């Protein structure tokens, strides 16, 4: 028997509906968990966008450990380590852990946090098979065990929240991926801007400065010298420091290099060796090799650059052939350069050699600028594509819930601004007995139905109308400049066409029906009041036997 009364369930659902973001919904779940009083602490761990780990988004530790809560908020739990979170996600079942059945790592956790029992509750749809949880609720009990009836109350509460949690989590993942894509596009634009600036410069000196600053921005290096081959020697052309505090050592080293150009004999210096081999040379920490034999030219350079730690020497190439080298140091502390960092340097130095050559051949640079502009256009198209993906339901091709809210708010603002002179209508569409259909025919057939109903809706609406998938088997139509009779007539056409159609699904031909509730904007309406009337109209349609249209 459910422990939540219909009235209490209604109160919670109303608060869930009013949650404006995932964090608000989780706060509400936390309040309800604490109100149950069945555990001394808890963690709410939800699946991250990669699907490979859980992230702790809310937690409450036992009283004596509550000062550590901020430290563990955002902690990630791997799903391949065999611990409680991973086992609960894999099984989709409630799991209890005590010292009697815990892994060695879990025993340490139980003892450290002074916990007698940890219980993992999967956050999944009730009765779903496979469970495919969206996360795990970990309950912490310091004394005794959580009774089965209390655990049943927790499970009922989790079941109530699951649908909203799943939707908000998907939205949060989409928003995060969208932000990551924007950051990636911004970085690519910055990189393209750098390349564009490089090709547009006619001063080689400015090219060196721009290249050094870009390298300082991307890698933790502090001092760079550029040298080019001319007349059988390699002459220093520029020395650049990352910070003003290194200016004195920069000047002294530059003066030494100008007075002592490199010989091209590969045994005379590390730079000459790199030039001849046409390959990068990396010394992770100079202190590890300072006792070894070294070319006199390099020994004198390092006597000037006494703080040198990591040393990187790379060829500067044009058409894959070395035309010089750049020598860089990290000062005071060694740095770790990954293979990706070295690949970046290899790419940039090839472009550097080209830019140096092209500074004397301005006409050649114009073709590169055109290519860069083309890449910028491609990036813009990618941004638009990502924005489209973030606002579209992949199954139906309709606007998703997030885009629906944005579109409805925009249309309501217009209706309010013009005093309701241009009518705005809303229709809420529900597929009748869809859960039974899924249970009978399978979710794949259900997905076929959702996609084909969306297609059927699209055949009837105007170009100015917006069809959205609200969630599950529900659709919403936003109809600007449409009165009550208009939305009723459109809804009836959609209902009749769906009723008359035999839908070819993977489970065979099927027939379905729709219940539709519709309403129009009234002065003073916000999105909640307008949607509430459409929802009431849909409820009446269902109460009237379904497969009908009701207006309110």
Image (cartoon, rainbow, N blue to C red):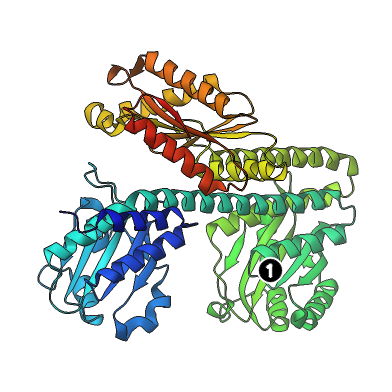
Q: Is 171 on the left or on the right of 324, as rendered?
A: left
Residue 366, given in percent of the width and then of the height, sits at 85, 40
Q: In this view, does 352 lie above or below 255?
A: above
Residue closer to the observer: 515 or 116: 515
Q: Is 450 on the left or on the right of 159, as rendered?
A: right
Q: Mark 1 points at which residue?
A: 328
Q: Can residue 278 be seen in this view?
A: no
Q: Is residue 403 above or below residue 47?
A: above
Q: Is residue 418 visible?
A: yes
Residue closer to the observer: 548 or 503: 548
Q: In this view, does 190 lie above or below 522?
A: below
Q: In this view, does 131 lie above or below 81?
A: above
Q: Report the label total.
A: 1
Residue 427, given in percent of the width and then of the height, sits at 50, 32
- Place residue 414 in its image quadrant: top right
Residue lying at the far bottom in this picture: please name it.
64
């Amino acid at each position: 028997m459910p422990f939540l009364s219909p009235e209490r369930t209604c109160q919670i659902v109303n608060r869930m509906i009013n949650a404006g973001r995932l964090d608000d919904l989780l706060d509400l779940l936390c309040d309800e968990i604490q109100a149950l009083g069945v555990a001394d602490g808890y963690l709410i761990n939800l699946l991250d966008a990669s699907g490979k780990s859980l992230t702790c988004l809310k937690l409450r530790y036992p009283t004596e450990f509550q000062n550590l809560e901020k430290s563990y908020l955002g902690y990630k739990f791997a799903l391949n380590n065999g611990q409680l979170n991973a086992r609960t996600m894999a099984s989709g079942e409630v799991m209890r852990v005590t010292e009697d059945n815990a892994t060695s790592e879990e025993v340490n956790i139980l003892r450290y946090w002074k916990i007698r029992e940890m219980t993992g509750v999967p956050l999944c749809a009730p009765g779903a098979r496979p469970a495919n949880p969206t996360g795990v609720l970990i309950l912490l009990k310091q004394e005794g065990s959580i009774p089965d009836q209390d655990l049943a109350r927790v499970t009922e509460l989790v079941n109530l929240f699951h649908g909203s949690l799943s939707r908000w989590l998907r939205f949060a993942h989409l928003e995060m991926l969208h932000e990551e894509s924007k950051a990636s596009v911004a970085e690519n634009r910055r990189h393209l801007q750098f390349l564009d600036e490089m090709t547009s410069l006619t001063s080689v000196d400015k090219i060196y400065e721009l290249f050094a600053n870009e390298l300082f921005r991307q890698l933790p290096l502090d001092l760079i010298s550029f040298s080019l081959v001319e007349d059988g020697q390699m002459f220093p052309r520029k020395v650049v420091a990352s910070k003003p505090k290194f200016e004195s050592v920069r000047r002294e080293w530059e003066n030494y290099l100008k007075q002592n150009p490199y010989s091209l004999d590969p045994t005379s210096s590390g730079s000459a060796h790199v030039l001849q081999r046409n390959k990068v040379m990396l010394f992770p920490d100079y202190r590890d090799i300072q006792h070894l034999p070294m070319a006199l030219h390099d020994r004198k350079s390092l006597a000037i650059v006494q703080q040198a730690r990591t040393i990187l020497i790379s060829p500067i190439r044009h058409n894959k052939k070395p035309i010089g080298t750049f020598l860089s140091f990290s000062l005071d502390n060694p740095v770790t350069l990954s293979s990706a960092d070295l690949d970046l340097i290899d790419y940039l130095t090839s472009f550097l050699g080209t830019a140096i050559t092209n500074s004397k051949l301005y006409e050649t640079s114009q073709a590169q600028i055109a290519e860069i502009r083309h890449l910028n256009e491609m990036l813009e198209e990618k941004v638009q594509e990502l924005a489209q993906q973030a606002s579209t339901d992949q199954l139906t091709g309709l606007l998703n819930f997030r885009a629906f809210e944005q579109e409805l708010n925009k249309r309501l603002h217009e209706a309010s601004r013009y005093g309701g002179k241009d009518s705005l209508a809303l229709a809420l569409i529900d597929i009748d007995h869809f859960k039974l259909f899924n249970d009978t025919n399978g979710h794949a057939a259900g997905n076929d139905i959702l996609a084909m109903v969306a297609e059927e809706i699209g055949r009837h609406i105007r170009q100015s109308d917006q069809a959205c998938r609200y969630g599950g088997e529900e659709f919403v139509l936003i109809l600007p400049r449409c009165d009550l009779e208009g939305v009723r007539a459109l809804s009836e056409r959609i209902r009749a066409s769906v009723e008359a159609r035999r839908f070819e699904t993977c489970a065979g031909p099927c027939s379905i029906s729709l219940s539709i509730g519709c309403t129009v904007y009234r002065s003073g309406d916000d999105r909640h009041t307008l949607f509430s009337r459409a929802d009431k109209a849909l409820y009446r349609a269902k109460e009237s036997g379904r497969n009908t249209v009701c207006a309110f």
